[in-house]
Amino acid sequence: MQRRHFIRHTGLTALGTGLVSTSIASLAGFRAGRLPANQLRLGLIGCKGMGWANLTSFLKMKEATCVAICDIDQTVLDQRKADLEKLNLKVDTYKDYRKLLERKDIDAVIIATPDHWHCLQMADACAAGKHVYVEKPASNSIGEAALMVAAAKRYNSIVQVNQWQRSQQHFKDAISMVRSGKLGTIAQAKAWMYNGHGILPKAETTPVPAGVDYNMWLGPAPKRDFNPNRFHYNFRWYWDYAGGLMTDWGVHLIDMVLLGLEPGLPKTVASMGGHIAYPADARETPDTQTALYNYDSFQLTWEHTMGRQNGLYDMGHGIAFIGDSGTLLLNRGGWEVRAEKEGGKPKMDAIAWQKQSDNGLDLHTRNFLDAIAAKDASKLNCPIEAGATTAMHCHLGNIAYRTGEVLQVKAAENGYLNLQTAGGNALLMPAYQNGWALPPL
């Protein structure tokens, strides 16, 4: 029971190793000593939350430095500039990312803005000759995902998506076991997130906070009055900017299913859910959702709910590969295999819990630097093609939920999809607003 208790709660306090940024004091220790002259010069676009976690991970490596940062919130910008000064890093600051991209001395950029900005900023960065480390989900729509793949190819940029679990050793080991065939025929896979978030109370619109360039924050999203519920972390609960828990956690967990089983496109996708845990919640995205993906050889189910942490298999979040010889259970804390029985005897050797032992984010940023040094995008653990594929899967689940339709998924030209319904196809690509335009394919 103690082990199961650990499994259930691993990842819900510190979210597993890889998401907690390093303190300034400890980071100074990493950067002590003589630095190489040919450092990779980074620019950071979006300095709060994961943007800062990503940058501090890069700064643990002496061959990387930061020369410029960009954020629409002056308070955040000033804080990060002060933090970097404690590391003897003098950076220029910007509120318009396009000014940062004009810098010829920047080799690569980290993009950690809300999801609705990822496509345009990544495409602009590639056009400016930069390599890109972009937050997950890669895009906020299926159409944008295809455009991002095209942009990286067009400008020959090395683009890594921050699905850092692909770089963590225990995830690699688990996926190797899935691919070994020892689990037998896998007819079903599950991925889930039981999230402890409480209700988000409704909030009135307010004046824009001092120092915030709200028009730039909105960018291509529809014009709306400022509401604190839609800003900073909570943007992820509104369709204009993101896709809820499906695209927040689904991209990490569904990604492992796609990595392990390599199924290609699903044949059909259906989804249902709603505001069930919290009927009066202010979020647009569902607090409870189940999506079903049908492939030629297996089914994948995704489910999430809020306000509950006792998930499937006594794990708050995880992935299950269910074979006729055994089931592999995997999350950010580790993995195990539970054997099926036949005639009272196990059909395979069970594998006890294999605990996580490294830092996935640090390994992922290191992988990005190594790919740039080798000038070889094939060395990336999560290139834009992989990130785009996973994002598309998550968007399919959300489109099926929003339309109430069973989507019949067909490949179309130029990386797009045809969902065989007018409602589904209408949600494939956003209509950019406020004078912003989609990047050309």
Image (cartoon, helix red, strand yellow):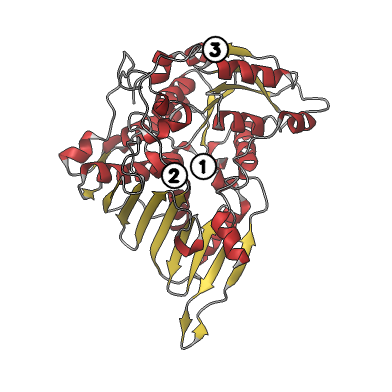
Quadrant assignment, res 27: top right
Name the N-terminal-most of marks 3 and 1. 3
- Mark 3 crowd level (few <14, some 14–19, many ≥20, 10 Å Cα): some
Look at 30% across and 18% down and name the residue there: 433
Q: In the rendered view, does 97 fall on the left or right side of 371?
A: left
Pick the front one: 243 or 324: 243
Amino acid type of disc 3?
Tyr
Above or below, comparing residue 174 to residue 69 in the picture: below
Amino acid type of disc 1?
Gln
Quadrant of the frame with the N terminus: bottom right
Name the N-terminal-most of marks 3 and 2. 3
The circle on residue 328 is: none
Above or below, comparing residue 317 to residue 325 in the picture: above
Name the N-terminal-most of marks 1 and 2. 1
Q: In the rendered view, does 15 fall on the left or right side of 266?
A: right
The circle on residue 94 is: 3
Badges 3 and 1: C-beta atoms under 8 Å apart? Answer: no
Look at 44% across and 70% down and name the residue there: 323
Look at 52% across and 20% down and name the residue there: 129
Residue 155: % across, % down? 46, 25
Residue bearing mark 1: 163
Residue 179 shows up from this direction: no
Assign a secondary structure to mark 2: helix
Residue 372: % across, % down? 60, 32
Residue 122: % across, % down? 46, 25
Assign a secondary structure to mark 1: loop
Assign a secondary structure to mark 3: strand
Residue bearing mark 2: 251
Look at 49% across and 28% down and name the residue there: 156
